[in-house]
Amino acid sequence: MPFCHCMAESLQQKRESGIHRVIEEVFPTLHETDINILIIRCVNMLGQLKVYSADNNHGRNDSHIDDSKAWYVLTLAESLQAVRRVFRSVNDIRTQRGEPLVEYFLPVCQMKTVRSGRQIVVEQKMLFTYLFVRDTLAGIRQLREHIPGLRLLRHPDDRSGDNWRYMTVTNREMAMFRTIADAFAGNLPCYRIDDVNLEDGDRVQVVGGQFDGVEGILRCAPGRAGGQVLLIVGNLLIVSTGNIAPQYIRILEFGSGNRHPYRQFETHLPRAVRALCRRLAGEAPDEADLAAMQVFTARFALLRPATVNLASSHAGLMLMSYAALDNRPRRDRWLAECEALLPQVTADQQRGLHLAMMHAATRRHDLATQLHRLIDAWQPIAPNQQKKLTIARMLTQFEAFD
């Protein structure tokens, strides 16, 4: 559920009375540290996110980021115009001295209001007193000497010895956050961390399109391959991309607690068998099957399977798909992967499937011999033992091409 709806009206009506007082009224039992975290998680959904930084975000080149710096979360209880003015003043001084400019990230939103009987749109800070500044900790402390009231946000979970840890957002998270922000002309979909269940979602990477390079959790409707990608920003909030077409999505890791990866692989296996059989028979595979091979190899090229059995199915299907596409370099690469996995695949039926997929793509006699030993030991195979029947049929089908 976007935003914290239970607080939206209260925050908007009582904003001038101080955000801490509003939170304390709605949640009187919260500790001060929890109030700080809740504030930054309750992101206003009423308008467009914009980013203000020393370079106005034009011509960014994150490849030159200095890893000794970090994006620190700070508070500054000043108006939007005052924050812009004070950072502009600091950067003017730094320019005169030939020093690097301060890079800051100030999310704002556009809100409708009525003044003198007319409805107008005004800009307000989205995260109230919060902003992000990229610098070293020493640089941040030096900056605080020139900006009264600028405070570092302490990490709520722990401290290192006598020194507090401070809240930060990684360079990569911030770059992806800004990519998503730049893509929206209207409202940026934001969520509280606790509002979204991320456990079952697949971790994906977007390749191509306006969200190129963004990594996050895929949220899609049942039966759909595309959807929205949710990005967690520094464990502070979640932002969402728009709907992304399946061809731009690469699966990195499957979500826990579901069996859909196995179903996807089981669905692809018959198409891979059919396409490869036609290829071996000297016929052109069906266009729909070829398209399925291309989609599968693209979508799962970056997958990092969590178990040996899943890695076995993934590597075998990649091998068969590239063989059906007659892509020998990629076929050989996945054949090497399958051979490296084979000693680790000890479950009886999965080992049989692994050998069957390798034999389908190579028709090697040593693989057929191992398969015959396994299948002979399974005899008789009952009609309801579908996996064993599939393995036996695959051996028969592809031995016909020897």
Image (spheres, rainbow, N blue to C red):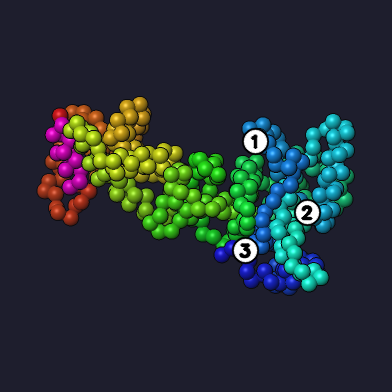
| Residue 22 vertical placement versus 75 (above, below) | below
Q: Residues within 10 Å of mark 3 (few under 14, many from 20)?
A: some
Frontmost residue, 124 versus 8: 124
Checking the image for residue 239, the label placed there is: none
Classify residue 128 as left or right of residue 292.
right
For marks 2 and 1 on the same chain, the one whose residue lies earlier in the sequence: 1
Whole-number angstrom distance, CA of label 1 to CA of label 3: 30 Å
Q: Residues within 10 Å of mark 1 (few under 14, many from 20)?
A: few
Frontmost residue, 371 versus 99: 99
Checking the image for residue 75, the label placed there is: 2
| Residue 150 vertical placement versus 320 (above, below) | below
Give the number of the mark in front: 3 or 2.
3
Whole-number angstrom distance, CA of label 3 to CA of label 2: 21 Å
Q: State which region is magenta.
A: 389-401
* Residue beneath the point at 63% across and 47% down: 182
Whole-number angstrom distance, CA of label 2 to CA of label 1: 25 Å
| Residue 29 vertical placement versus 211 (above, below) | below
Give the number of the mark in front: 2 or 1.
1
Residue that extends furthest to the left in the rendered view of this protein: 380
| Dominant SS in magenta | helix
Name the amino acid, label 2: Thr
Disc 3 marks which residue? 3
Residue 174 percent across, percent down from the top left? 65, 45
Q: Residues within 10 Å of mark 2 (few under 14, many from 20)?
A: some
Residue 350 percent across, percent down from the top left? 27, 43
Name the amino acid, label 1: Asp
Residue 218 percent across, percent down from the top left? 48, 52
Classify residue 217 as left or right of residue 147.
left
Query: Would you say residue 395 sits in the magenta stretch?
Result: yes
Disc 1 marks which residue? 62
Element under label 3?
loop
Query: Would you say residue 90 sits in the magenta stretch?
Result: no
